[in-house]
Image (spheres, helix red, strand yellow):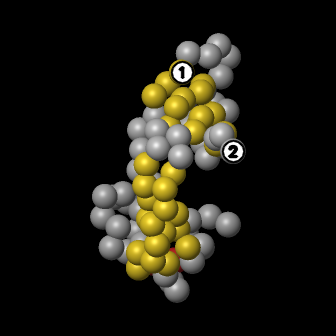
Amino acid sequence: MDRAHSYLLWVSDFSVQPLTVPSYFLALAPAGEGTIYYTTRPDLRNFSDLTKRSTWGEPVATFIREASIVRSGDNLTPTLSYSRPT
């Protein structure tokens, strides 16, 4: 399911610190916090300006994000592939 059709949207802002690894992109995403938004009309969300979240729904919860390693298949763009200690 994508963000335009999901009733719950998990959002956590962060900047990554690139790690030097040959042949693919790895980066460290530091620990942080995030917010979970809920709406009954996900089709009305507007993602054209990511700082304006009023259309994303009602903030219903917060969460803590642990530090993690982010991997990118295209060597440029981080994806949501995380690895963290258990």
Q: Quadrant of the N terminus?
A: bottom right
Residue at figure coordinates x 69%, y 45% from the top left: 86
What separation in Å lies between label 2 and label 1 (alpha carbons)?
Answer: 21 Å
Which numbered circle lies on residue 61?
none
Q: Is residue 23 above or below residue 72?
A: above
Marks counted in the figure total 2
Residue 19 is labelled as 1
Q: Amino acid at mark 2?
A: Thr
Residue under the image location 64 percent in, 41 percent down: 84
Q: Which residue in the rendered view is the most extreme toward the left?
A: 52
The residue drawn where x is 56% and y is 15% is 20
Q: Position of residue 9 (x, y in %)?
A: 52, 68
Residue 25, image x and y in percent? 60, 25
> Residue 55's x, y, as percent?
37, 74
Q: Which residue is tagged 2?
A: 86
Q: Residue at x 61, y 46 (%)?
A: 80
Depth order, front residue of 37/41: 37
